[in-house]
């Protein structure tokens, strides 16, 4: 009850309540709708509030001081409410009751018909737990009468209590209307630790292949939410059970049954190992780290080599899987329309995750150059996830972590003290020798033997003189 009272004191709740009261004062029906009602019933503070109303979009647009339409074709208007206490503006999404027409593209109806019926509006929504309305006007200050204020035409409260994700009406029709709902069913079930109602699951399994009709961007967003909401393992188990996994991430589906050497991976095959990493991802984890955890071993299936009986100690090998995995990861992320910066970081995580095995043998300059990888703490965290999901030998992790944090933060990204321009000014032309000289001076800088540009230029002269003597 305390959590509910706290949620009712937020600026988002107050803004949405103001919208409802204003619309009611003008003779229209208006209720909180969808996910915010579900969350309040679960004792979770909603991040935002949606309002459903009998008012037509044009009435909503003209009924408030600041509004704008974001989906006029679907009757959606954003109402902006000034919140004096915080000095900021709160946005509330307001949708007119409607009945959807025919869906031809597996995403949105060709046309909508506005309605005066709240029940009719609810029946076109996706899942029962998202299909409830709430009358906030009569809500007690402490929320003690919350359940009495809920309008539930679809059995949403029953399914919340039973911990079920159930499609409203005919699940086959719901998923034919909008294919993305299949991924949303997985995400909601994983996030709330619910089961997917059997008939709903069967409809998903029957239509799993049609997920290909959904845009890559929408698939990416749902998968990223699954990975970062704190229940990634369960989400991917459900993706597998529903038959969706081979259609959204076939490369991950191929991890199943790929054996690993038991001395290094007593937990099982590549799929089992990956699920263990996912089970350790907390809510709010960085998407790049989450995707790195999912894809770090994506190169193992194509690189699998069975034990060679000719070897003294035959064992399974995955030679070059990090490099192959990096190439595959770039292709996957491009397919899902990730940004270039996200792609570069996730690919780097996959490509470099095996290098931790050599950290104790690296020269100081090599180790320091390793530490210069963008957002190295993410690399460290991925290595910890990898190791604790397999043999649990943390020696390399502890060594890398200790040496990384022993170096002042500003030195990790320190620019080279001598650049190609300095070499050109000295009369040198780009080429193999050019690169060799820059590398030698940068190594000395990383090892602490060169600390300034003057030191670097002095070393350059010494290297050039040494070359002259050799000649």
Image (spheres, grey):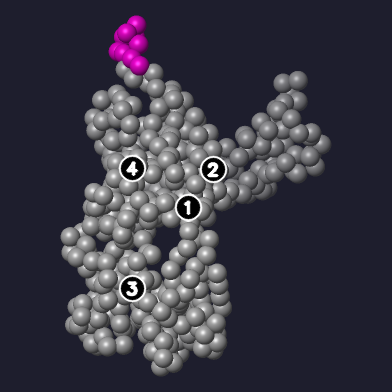
| Residue 45 seen by the camera | no
Q: Pointer 3: what residue?
A: 119
Specify the principal SS of the magenta part: loop
Q: Quadrant of the C terminus?
A: top right
Q: CA distance from mark 3 to mark 2?
A: 40 Å
First along the sequence among labels 1 and 2: 1
First along the sequence among labels 4 and 1: 1
Q: CA distance from mark 1 to mark 3?
A: 23 Å
Residue count near mark 4 (Cα–Cα under 10 Å), binned few <14, some 14–19, many ≥20:
some
Picture disc at residue 335:
2
Residue positioned 51% across, 76% down in the render:
77
Picture disc at residue 270:
none
Q: Specify the segment rendered in magenta.
A: 306-314
Expressed as whole percent of the image width and height from the top left, the position of residue 53 reads 41, 80
Picture disc at residue 106:
1
Camera-nearest residue between 269 and 320: 269
Residue 48 sits in quarter: bottom left
Foreground label between 4 and 3: 3
**Residue 308 inside the magenta-drawn segment:** yes
Q: Pointer 4: what residue?
A: 205
């Amino acid at each position: 009850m305390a959590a509910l009272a706290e949620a009712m004191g937020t600026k988002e709740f107050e803004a949405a309540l103001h919208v409802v009261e204003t619309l009611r004062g003008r003779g229209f029906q208006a209720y909180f709708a969808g996910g915010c009602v579900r969350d309040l019933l679960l004792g979770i503070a909603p991040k935002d509030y949606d309002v459903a109303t009998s008012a037509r979009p044009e009435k909503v647009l003209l009924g408030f001081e600041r509004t704008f339409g974001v989906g006029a074709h679907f009757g959606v208007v954003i109402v902006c409410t000034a919140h004096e206490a915080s000095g900021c503006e709160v946005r509330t999404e307001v949708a007119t009751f409607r009945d959807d027409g025919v869906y031809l593209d597996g995403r949105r109806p060709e046309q909508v018909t506005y309605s005066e019926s709240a029940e009719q509006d609810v029946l076109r929504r996706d899942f029962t737990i998202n299909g409830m309305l709430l009358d906030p006007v009569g809500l007690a200050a402490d929320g003690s009468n919350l359940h009495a204020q809920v309008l539930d035409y679809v059995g949403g409260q029953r399914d919340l209590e039973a911990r079920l994700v159930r499609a409203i009406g005919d699940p086959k029709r719901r998923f034919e209307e909008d294919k993305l709902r299949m991924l949303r069913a997985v995400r909601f079930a994983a996030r709330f630790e619910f089961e997917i109602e059997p008939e709903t699951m069967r409809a998903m399994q029957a239509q799993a292949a049609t997920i290909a009709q959904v845009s890559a961007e929408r698939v990416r967003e749902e998968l990223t939410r699954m990975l970062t909401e704190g229940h990634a393992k369960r989400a991917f188990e459900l993706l597998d059970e529903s038959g969706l996994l081979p259609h959204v991430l076939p490369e991950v589906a191929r991890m199943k049954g790929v054996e690993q050497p038991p001395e290094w991976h007593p937990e099982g095959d590549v799929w089992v190992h990956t699920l263990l990493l996912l089970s350790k991802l907390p809510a709010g984890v960085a998407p790049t780290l989450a995707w790195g955890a999912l894809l770090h071993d994506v190169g193992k299936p194509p690189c699998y080599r069975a034990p060679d009986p000719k070897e003294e100690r035959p064992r399974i090998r995955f030679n070059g899987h990090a490099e192959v995995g990096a190439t595959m990861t770039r292709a996957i992320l491009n397919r899902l329309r990730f940004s270039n910066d996200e792609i570069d970081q996730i690919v780097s995580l996959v490509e470099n995750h095996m290098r931790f095995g050599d950290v104790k043998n690296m020269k100081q300059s090599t180790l320091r150059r390793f530490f210069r990888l963008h957002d190295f703490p993410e690399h460290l965290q991925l290595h910890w996830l990898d190791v604790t999901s397999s043999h649990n030998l943390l020696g390399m992790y502890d060594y890398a972590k200790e040496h990384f944090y022993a170096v002042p933060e500003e030195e990790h990204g320190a620019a080279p003290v001598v650049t190609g321009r300095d070499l050109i000014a000295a009369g040198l032309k780009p080429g193999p020798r050019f690169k060799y000289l820059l590398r030698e001076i940068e190594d000395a800088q990383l090892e602490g033997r060169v600390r300034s540009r003057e030191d670097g230029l002095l070393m350059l002269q010494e290297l050039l003189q040494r070359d002259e003597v050799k000649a």
